[in-house]
Image: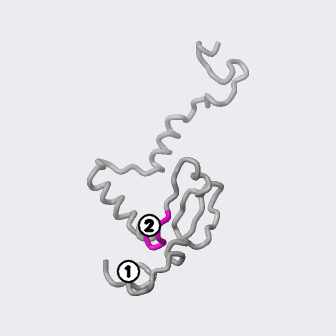
Amino acid sequence: MSGTDQPTGPAATAPYRFAEQHTPPPALRASEVAQTTFEHVYEVDPRLMQEHVLQQVFPNWDTLRIMRSRHDHLAWMHRHFAETVVTGSEILAEVEAETAGRPNPQVLNPETGPFDGPEAR
């Protein structure tokens, strides 16, 4: 990492203040289940995870470090474990092509009900 790529934040000699380093900016709602605190950092609304997932407190600089390194990590995973890389749009196109022309089994059919087949009759 060159000197220009250094994360912003307090200098190494700055006094440590827990509240400054562990309190993220106010969250902005991105959807019903997601929020964003830092630019391009989306996370599940923590209120939805309180029952089953223990929430961790860690410094703002660590959140930003993780987000800055996500593309490097993904590239490393692809180099070491993926024979091919498939995009989400390719998967959706394949699913749509397979289901084109087929009736949707979740739509009620007045003659057979919600399921078509011998077990539904």
Q: Disc 2 residue type?
A: Met
**What x and y, as percent, mark residue 23?**
55, 72
Label 2: few (<14), some or many (≥20) within 10 Å?
some
**Mark 1 = which residue?**
6
Range of the magenta residues? 57-63
**The magenta stretch spans residue 60:** yes
Q: How is the image coloured?
A: one colour
Q: Disc 1 residue type?
A: Gln
The answer to whether residue 12 is above or below residue 49 is below
Q: Residue at x 32, y 48 (%)?
A: 84
Q: Residue at x 38, y 84 (%)?
A: 12
The answer to whether residue 20 is above or below residue 113 is below
Question: Left of 3 or right of it: where is 30?
Answer: right
Q: CA distance from mark 1 to mark 2?
A: 14 Å
Determine the secondary structure under disc 1: loop
- Farthest residue to the right: give it: 110
Assign the N terminus to one quadrant of the image: bottom left
**Mark 2 = which residue?**
67
Name the foreground residue: 60 vs 64.
60
Q: Residue at x 49, y 60 (%)?
A: 56
Name the foreground residue: 115 vs 48.
48
**What x and y, as percent, mark residue 26?**
62, 71
Q: Are marks 1 and 2 in contact (CB under 8 Å)?
A: no
Name the foreground residue: 40 vs 18.
18
Q: Residue at x 57, y 52 (%)?
A: 49
**What x and y, as percent, mark residue 114?**
66, 24
